[in-house]
Image: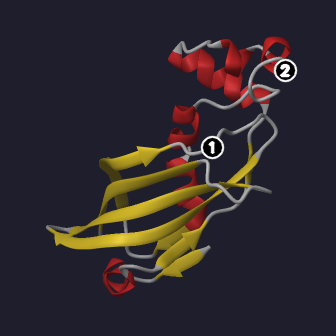
Amino acid sequence: MRHYEKLADLAAEVGQEVGLSDWLSIDQERIQRFADATEDQQWIHTDPVRAAAGPFGCTIAHGFLTLSLVSHFFDSGFTIGDSRMGLNYGLNKVRFPAPVPVGSRLRARFKLLDFQPIEGGAQLVVECTIEREGSSKPVMVAESVSRRFI
């Protein structure tokens, strides 16, 4: 985990990797809890027997489950010492280039694309690339827009 003492320190990091998260395991229980919360019970996510005969040979995590973990990954990827609060402002672009088979371990790399001062803090655009252990292809790439306040 990288630590920045001050939010302003990130201004010099545009174009650079600013953090790398810890690994997180994706098990069937997590996939099922997400399916229950979103009412997306598609068999490719929730039926291990049927999914075993499907295109991926097992259940896979929802793309939106992967996306929903971005906040978690941010927390273990980098910290900003003088930031008292951060808000998710939105997303510019999200892609899911590869599936997340049950049992996968994921982590995120963060590259700062833009830093814009705003009243009380800064707006950050961060490219979040979520990697699956053992795979060269990312499972998600998103441009996250957040606002950090000091």
Relative to 7, residue 97 above or below: above
Residue that numbered label 1 is attached to: 98
- Among numbered discs 2 and 1, the one appearing first in the sequence: 2
Residue occupying the point 75% across, 36% down? 101
Q: Is residue 142 above or below residue 40?
A: below
Q: What residue is pinned by disc 2?
A: 52
Residue 23 x %, y %: 73, 57
* Residue at the extreme left: 119
The residue at 60%/15% (across/down) is 36
State which quadrant residue 99 falls in.
top right
- The residue lying toward the viewer, choosing from 22 and 127, is 127
Q: CA distance from mark 2 to mark 1?
A: 18 Å
On screen, 124 above or below 65?
A: below
- The x, y position of residue 139, in whole percent, is 61, 48
Q: Quadrant of the N terminus?
A: bottom right
Work out which quarter of the rendered image holds the C terminus and state it.
bottom left
Indicate the secondary structure of the residue bearing disc 2.
helix
Judging depth in this view, the residue of 31 and 86 nearest the camera is: 31
Asked whether 137 or 149 is in front, the reply is 137
